[in-house]
Image (cartoon, rainbow, N blue to C red):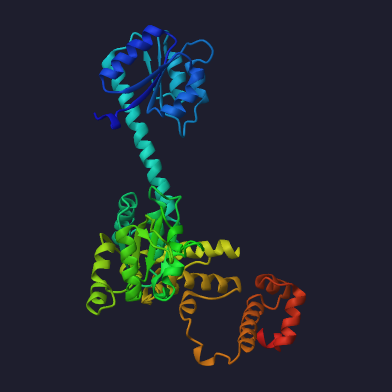
Amino acid sequence: MTKNKAFRILVIDDDKSMRQSLLELLEVAGWQAVAISRASMAENHMADFQPDVILSDVRMPGMSGLDLLASLDRSTAAPLVLISAHGDIPTAVKAIQDGAYGFVEKPYEPRRLLTILKHAAEQNRMRQTNTRLKERLFKLSGLDRVLLGQTDQVVHLRQDILDLADIGITVLIEGETGTGKELVARALHDLGTDAGSPFLALNCAALSPDTFEAEMLGVAGGPDGRLLAASGGTLFLDEICSCPIVVQAKLLRVIEDKQIFPVNAQRPVPISFRVISATNEDVELAVKEGRMRQDLLFRLNTMMLRLPTLRQRRDDLVLLATHFLEEFARIYEIAVPDISQDDLAALLAHDWPGNVRELRSVCERRILSARRGGGSMTQAIRTDQHLDNIPDTLREAVAAFERELIGKAITAHEGRMDAAAEALGIGRRTLNEKIVKLGLDKGALL
């Protein structure tokens, strides 16, 4: 058992000779042990030492072992094993019922005591590991639900992110538009050891060779460059294949030298950050076509993550759609509409060129339609069905949109104007004014 993996134990006993005996036994067994004489001292030691298990006498001056047990937060505290020379069946039963991991009578049998303590410590470490994993997976839900799913591709992707987050190496993320590349980059940052440090996302297609130095590197005596603000954190280079070649050379120099040279500066400024990049293109093809520097690619692709398209994970469609519908139903404060067989068929028949981002938008449109009393997934997916009849001016487009929404609300609520106004989120008087202004015929709608 190596030192960094040795179990830690806090021993509490008012008998000095017993404390010394226990310490000798535990240290020979490879434990890191701290011994104190009063249970009232335990709180400070637990905070500093963070034991894997606590071994406490039952009867002590002041706070007893049972009192200590009652004071512990069972959801976070280390397991407590009680030891007593006055043990009897009722005391042991009460201790276990109150949450003690175990109860040992003095004089103790060393091998049995060590076995109980080892099992308690192992259970506690397993609980801590599970807690950390749950916290990480909870943070993963912040990926805008892109990583929600049970298909093999998504399960493996989640594990890859967990594995790479703490390492700090460069990662190149490949994936079509809408698959969640920036969100994955943020997960790598948020789950890493420097989660509280800056995260700077740059759209490489928008970087100008003419203004790169002043904007990104800064000007001596003037404002700091944006890259300096990211020092100590993560630099995310989105659409890296669309980065101008001249700018690629300058980025490569910064990454290799780990320093920047502000405009008019006399000396360089040290800088350090993790680099994560992303592209929706074939990087090898971009290199062949001269749009991507091969030396920069070699700096960026230490590890590569390929994000699956929604077409490759159709088994997640219903799960994702249900999740998004529930999310927007909460936002817009309506009941979640059921996914009908027709809706399911529409979801499965669509190619989803915009991937999860497109599905999320479709679900929001579905909820907005349901808020007005109608709609379906088929209608929400068909965003281009009226492109031939788009009004020429914005004023006409707004009027046409309001006319359609109000008409649907009146029809859905069978002419009950108060209900229609409430569904539209406007007052009854405002609704009446809009009906007159838009020239709507209430009778023709019913």
From the viewer's perspective, is residue 206 above or below residue 121?
below
Q: Position of residue 401 (x, y in %)?
A: 61, 83
What count of labels does the image hold? 0
Pick the front one: 18 or 4: 4
**Foreground pick, 100 / 137:** 137
Residue 148 visible (yes or no): no
Query: Image point 47% across, 19% down: which residue?
Result: 94
263 or 324: which is nearer to us?
Answer: 263
Q: Quadrant of residue 105?
A: top left
State the image quarter where residue 279 is shown: bottom left
82 up-or-down from 211: above or below: above
Q: Residue at x 35, y 11 (%)?
A: 20
Q: Residue at x 46, y 50 (%)?
A: 196
Q: Position of residue 430 (x, y in %)?
A: 75, 77
The answer to whether residue 406 is seen in the rendering is yes
Q: Quadrant of the N terminus?
A: top left
Q: Percent from the top left, x then y, of residue 260? A: 38, 61
Q: From the viewer's perspective, tell me whether residue 74 is left or right of residue 297.
A: right
Kindly give the residue lying farthest to the right in the view shown. Answer: 429
The residue at 44%/59% (across/down) is 228
**Quadrant of the snapshot with the C terminus:** bottom right
Residue 323 percent across, percent down from the top left: 46, 61
Name the image quarter holding residue 179.
bottom left
